[in-house]
Amino acid sequence: MATHAILEELGVAYQLIEIDLAKGMQRTPEYLAINPNGKVPVLEHRGEVIYESAAILMYLLDQHPDAGLAPAPHSPQRGHYYQYLTWMSNTLQEAANRWAHPEHCVAGDSDLTPVVEKATHELSRCWSIINDDLGGKGPWLLGDRVSGADFHLFMVAYWSSRYDSRAQDFPNLRRHLQAMLQRDSIKRMMSQEGLTFKL
């Protein structure tokens, strides 16, 4: 979602190829030759293959610095931009993955309840951190200017609408979601992917 929305935000030409996870297309030999992790998304650009959402997002925005969606390399905000993207990938998103797929964390027929409960607690802790940051710096993660990090946050927040701990239940995050939902790029991405989001 984040990669797709950023491509729409940039207004660049691209070809979107659907990998149907429900059909196991991510585990075919052809796809594993592109991304051995068997996950989406993957970006192919100028003969190079890049995977991991945050890496793709940073790469795309470095290709289009005039879009203003990433702080300049020597800006003090660049560190916070990196911080949010890596933290969301390594901490927030990992908690989300444990909630959504607790079966990946245990062997056999183990009880999944403790995994889900721990993931819910971690998600709430993460949402509280971001909610406080948005309250102190907002309306965007880097202050008064939207950045690629906000698109990544929107993606994980969207997923959380079905979780036991939801981003939309935190007031500053709810405002952030409302603002992101007003962006034309987000509207186009969601329309193309057949997604809806009711707050």
Image (tube, rainbow, N blue to C red):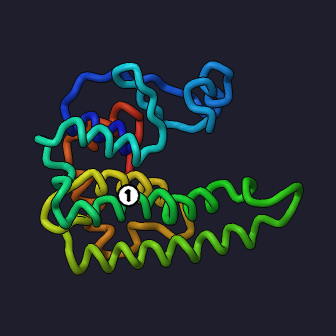
Mark 1, residue position: 85
Q: Quadrant of the C terminus?
A: bottom left
Q: Left or right: where does residue 38 sit relative to residue 18?
A: right
Which residue corresponds to the image point at 13% horizontal and 65% vertical from the top-left? 144
Answer with the quarter of the image where residue 171 lies: bottom left
Given residues 185 and 149, the one toward you in this image is 149
Considering only vertical position in the picture, is 20 above or below 116? above
Considering only vertical position in the picture, is 5 above or below 137? above
- How crowded is the residue under tag 1: few (<14 C-alpha within 10 Å), some, or many (20+)? many
Given residues 68 and 196, the one toward you in this image is 68
Given residues 79 and 155, the one toward you in this image is 79
Which residue corresponds to the image point at 52% horizontal and 71% vertical from the top-left? 123
Residue 92 location (% of width, % of height):
49, 64
Q: Left or right: where does residue 180 sit relative to residue 85?
A: left
Residue 54 location (% of width, % of height):
40, 48
Considering only vertical position in the picture, is 147 above or below 53? below
Q: Left or right: where does residue 198 sit relative to residue 106?
A: left
Q: Residue furthest front?
A: 74
Residue 60 location (% of width, % of height):
29, 38
Answer with the quarter of the image where residue 139 lies: bottom left
